[in-house]
Amino acid sequence: MLSPTDAAVRAVLRRACIVQVATLSPKGRPFVTPLWFVVDRGALYITTGPETWAGKNVTQHPEVALLLGPEPAGSSDQVLRLRGRATCHRGLPSWRVLLRVALKYYLSPRALRAELRNARKWRLRQRYYGQISGGFGYIRVIPTAAEFLPRP
């Protein structure tokens, strides 16, 4: 096991755009969903609504596992697994976190290229976010352990 603050862990977190969030349902069933995230002051802030499956699951079972693959895809034979404790929050995170989200997913050259490539999906994304009840929210994860695993 590595510390979540290890240099190799931080490098993966800087490069990755998507995190696979693994939670447990209230009945103990696993649920995995890919979501956007940013890191701020040692915590991961994951964008999702409080009424999504991930948000509801974290409320019941705060222990989560996060998987981050190599980016660009196929550039490594390992994935990073973080374990941590999560809390689900209603409303928007701090301005500092929102700025990080904007810089990472909307304003960086890499993000702009991805957005333009997926312009046809904007309406689909708008419909997805429109159906989420409960308003804005986010999941905050404090990582407790990290390890690199062989890529499946």
Image: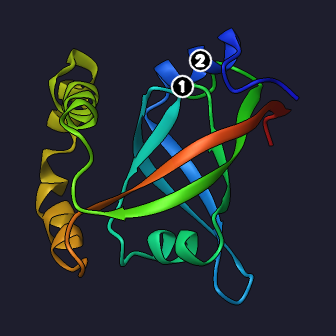
Q: Amino acid at mark 2?
A: Arg
Colouring scheme, one of rainbow, by chain, secondary structure, one colour:
rainbow
Residue 66 appears at what percent x and percent y?
64, 47
Q: Is residue 42 above or below residue 50?
A: above
Which label belongs to residue 13? 1
Residue that protrudes farthest toward the top in the picture: 7
* Left or right position of 136 against 8: left
Which label belongs to residue 129? none
- SS category of the residue bearing label 1: helix
67 or 87: nearer the viewer? 87
Other residues around mark 1 within 10 Å, as few (<14) / some (14–19) / many (≥20): many
* Residue 72 makes an appearance in the image: no
Q: Residue at x 36, y 78 (%)?
A: 51
* Left or right position of 19 against 26: left
Residue position marked by numbered label 2 in the rendering:
10
Residue 139 appears at what percent x and percent y?
44, 56
Q: Residue at x 65, y 72 (%)?
A: 61
Q: Quadrant of the C terminus?
A: top right
Q: Amino acid at mark 1?
A: Leu
